[in-house]
Image (cartoon, coloured by chain):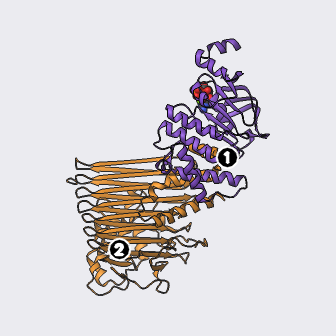
């Protein structure tokens, strides 16, 4: 599904290398988790994959189902099936959440040569998916993320993911800022979407989320590289002992 | 001295090219306005009030030619059920207009209301003259003196349809001067629509007298002809508990100066003036607003948004004057521009002058580019850069468009803005 090969990235404005050769291969249907100290490059990886400005790829490649992602515009990556749930979802004053969702859904359909979703079908689907995530009608009407609490913003990301039905979902610290119940809702939302043809890359600092969304593989990222990979037990080790031991061991 | 002479010469040259219509009841007001115009002279480039907008092409005896745009689309408000009154290059077109009859209102043409007695006699030029202090507005005085036509509208009930003034432009060299007077009686309510480019150069003045408890909704769309020029004035006096809401859409136009002069004379009244303008290239748009609070517990709102690209210029001069004793005044003013490139510019001069102590007034002015974070967020969800930029641009304009109370009219305006942006994406 996702093949990342020796990906190297620096900041465009500064001479600062952030990703120093990331290798990652995620097969269809798999859930991978990435953990790692603050500033190790996890969000940068997710941004570079989704096409954010400000980064310069100095080497390597990243392909989604064989198509080179790094040559595409952000909207093309989305239409190709990539989705990023942002660590910090963006507020967009003046654009209603519903309008935003509908525009996004139909833009992707158009890019794939599919017919637009009818207003009634769309409404039906949004309502039912929003209900699962305990997002009320009022939140759907409000401008995108404006005045939403931290937890509401994260649930809104999952709603978008559910509506867009991507192949490759990257969740960047979707658990941060969530209370225990909201975390369960989000995890249920993710689990409901798990399928053979859909993969997940879950970035998190805590085992908690991984209790609910069980990963097949766990990676540790440090200083712009994936320094260790293993099974779910690796996350438990981090939870119990922090990163010091692991980093010392690979140093 | 040299400057004063230049001004004098420009004024003389312009006056030489104009002739005052036979007056009847309006003759005294016209002569008075001419006297005031001679005394103040046409604006010069050094005048503080014209610091950001060059008056030259508005001053010169004949207007620079303006091509007539054939955009092949239905004019704004075409789908609205309304009473249509059409002017072509400033000349009333009876064949294209509906009968000037509508329940709850009497409508006459200025050019036809002769005789010595008329209800509009107390108003014609009166609000304009009041509006000359403390800032001079020479083009309004010129208008009062030389207007060739216009409408005298007396609203005594609540007409079921809007009164729609349609200004067509057919002659590339036309120079139109229209003066409307509107009186809305106590408890009466009306919607007035205006649309169209009107002429190569258009000088329009509208004097509005709102009695206690009167309501006026005003929505206008200035025509899309690229080379047209316009200088317009709205003078509104608000009686107690009256409501005045005015919105202007400006898309294109080489030069537009829209002045709104609003005075609260009765308590508990509400006035909102808003504008959304979109300009591309050779576009200069100036909103100049002066709100005077001279009564208790009145609310004024000014909401002006400008989208500028390819070297377009936007100007905002807005003032809230709260006189002594105008307690509980709620005054709000916001002027913002969205610059879609580095060549465009926005010049703003927001002002507050307050002589009462128990008031809440705020003003803000900003100039910025498209929010890159928001743009990336939209693109990451699959919305291509063009439509995503438009969506954010419309969101920026929304606060102004939302000032239109009627949902159908608001949707019509929003649709025009969207289409304008879409055309520019090619
Ligand atoms: N646009 C930028 N400008 C300056 N520095 C940046 C920028 N983007 C990333 N960095 C730097 O790159 C490094 C990696 O940041 P990144 O956000 O990817 O870390 P992270 O692993 O997601 O951290 P966290 O766990 O705190 O979310 C940090 O040192 C960060 O300061
Ligand atoms: Mg991060």
> What residue does disc 2 label?
B144
Q: Which chain is purple in the picture?
A: A
Q: Chain of mark 2?
A: B
Residue located at (63% from left, 22% from top): A235
> What residue does disc 1 label?
A75
User: As rendered, which of B321 and A80 lies closer to the eye?
Assistant: A80
Q: Is residue B199 left or right of residue B269?
A: right
For label 1, the SS is: helix
Residue B174 vertical placement versus B24 (above, below): above
User: As rendered, which of B130 and B320 lies closer to the eye?
Assistant: B320
Q: Position of residue A182 (x, y in %)?
A: 51, 35
Residue A242 vertical placement versus B204 (above, below): above
Q: Quadrant of ligand 1?
A: top right
Residue A37 vertical placement versus B159 (above, below): above
- Which part of the image, by quadrant, shows the C terminus of chain B? bottom right
Q: Position of residue A24 (x, y in %)?
A: 74, 29
Q: Position of residue B208 (x, y in %)?
A: 32, 70
Question: Which disc number belongs to residue A56?
Answer: none
Residue located at (34% from left, 77% from top): B153
- How many numbered marks does the figure carry? 2
How far apart, in angstroms, are the residues tagged by discs 2 and 1?
A: 56 Å
Q: Which chain is orange in the picture?
A: B
């Amino acid at each position: 599904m996702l093949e990342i090969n020796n990906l190297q990235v620096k900041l465009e404005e500064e001479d600062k290398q952030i990703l120093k050769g990331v290798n990652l291969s995620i097969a269809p249907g798999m859930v991978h988790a990435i953990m790692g100290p603050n500033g190790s490059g996890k969000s940068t990886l997710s941004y570079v994959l989704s096409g954010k400005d400000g980064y310069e790829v100095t080497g390597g490649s990243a392909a989604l189902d064989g198509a080179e992602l790094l040559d595409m515009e952000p909207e093309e990556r989305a239409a190709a099936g990539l989705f990023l749930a942002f660590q910090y979802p963006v507020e967009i004053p003046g654009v209603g959440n519903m309008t935003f969702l509908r525009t996004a859904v139909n833009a992707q359909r158009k890019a794939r040569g599919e017919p637009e979703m009818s207003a009634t079908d769309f409404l039906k689907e949004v309502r039912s998916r929003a209900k699962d995530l305990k997002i009320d009608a009022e939140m759907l009407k409000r401008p995108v993320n404006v005045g939403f609490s931290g937890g509401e913003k994260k649930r809104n990301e999952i709603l978008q993911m559910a509506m867009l039905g991507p192949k490759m979902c990257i969740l960047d610290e979707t658990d941060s800022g969530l209370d225990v119940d909201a975390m369960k809702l989000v995890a249920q939302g993710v689990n409901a979407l798990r399928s053979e043809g859909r993969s997940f890359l879950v970035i998190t600092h805590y085992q908690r989320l991984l209790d609910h969304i069980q990963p097949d593989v766990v990676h540790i990222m440090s200083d712009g590289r994936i320094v260790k990979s293993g099974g779910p037990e690796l996350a438990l080790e981090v939870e119990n002992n922090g990163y010091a031991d692991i980093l010392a061991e690979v140093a | 001295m040299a400057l004063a002479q230049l001004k004098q010469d420009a004024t003389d040259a312009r006056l030489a090219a104009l002739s005052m219509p036979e007056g009847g009841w309006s003759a005294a007001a016209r002569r008075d306005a001419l006297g005031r115009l001679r005394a103040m002279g046409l604006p010069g480039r050094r005048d503080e009030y014209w610091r950001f907008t060059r008056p030259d092409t508005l001053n010169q005896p004949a207007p620079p030619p303006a091509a007539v745009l054939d955009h092949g689309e239905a004019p704004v408000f075409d789908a609205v059920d309304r009473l249509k009154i059409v002017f072509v290059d400033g000349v009333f077109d009876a064949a294209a207009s509906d009968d000037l009859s509508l329940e709850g209102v009497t409508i006459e043409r200025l050019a036809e209301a002769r005789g010595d007695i008329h209800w509009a006699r107390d108003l014609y030029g009166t609000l304009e003259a009041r509006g000359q202090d403390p800032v001079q507005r020479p083009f309004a005085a010129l208008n009062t003196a030389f207007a060739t036509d216009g409408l005298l509208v007396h609203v005594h009930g609540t007409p079921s349809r809007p009164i729609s003034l349609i200004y067509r432009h057919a002659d590339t060299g036309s120079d139109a001067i229209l003066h409307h007077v509107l009186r809305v009686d106590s408890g009466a309510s009306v919607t007035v629509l205006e649309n169209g480019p009107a002429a190569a150069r258009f000088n329009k003045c509208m004097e509005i007298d709102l009695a206690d408890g009167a309501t006026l909704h005003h929505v206008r769309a200035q025509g899309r002809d690229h080379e047209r020029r316009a200088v317009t004035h709205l003078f509104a006096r608000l009686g107690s508990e009256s409501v005045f809401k005015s919105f202007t859409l400006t898309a294109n136009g080489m030069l537009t100066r829209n002045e709104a002069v609003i005075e609260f004379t009765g308590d508990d009244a509400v006035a909102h003036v808003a504008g959304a303008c979109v300009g591309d290239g050779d576009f200069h748009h100036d909103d100049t607003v002066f709100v005077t609070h001279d009564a208790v517990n009145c609310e004024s709102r000014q909401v002006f948004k400008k989208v500028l690209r390819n070297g377009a210029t936007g100007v905002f001069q807005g003032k809230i004057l709260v006189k002594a004793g105008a307690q509980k005044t709620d005054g709000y003013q916001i002027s913002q521009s969205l610059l879609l490139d580095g060549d465009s510019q926005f010049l703003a001069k927001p002002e507050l002058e307050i002589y009462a102590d128990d008031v809440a007034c705020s003003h803000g002015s900003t100039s910025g580019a498209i929010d890159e974070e928001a743009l990336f967020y939209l693109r990451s969800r699959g919305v291509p850069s063009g439509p995503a930029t438009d969506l954010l641009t419309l969101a920026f304009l929304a606060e102004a468009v939302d000032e239109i109370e009627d949902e159908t009219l608001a949707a019509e305006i929003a649709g025009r803005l969207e289409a304008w942006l879409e055309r520019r994406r090619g």
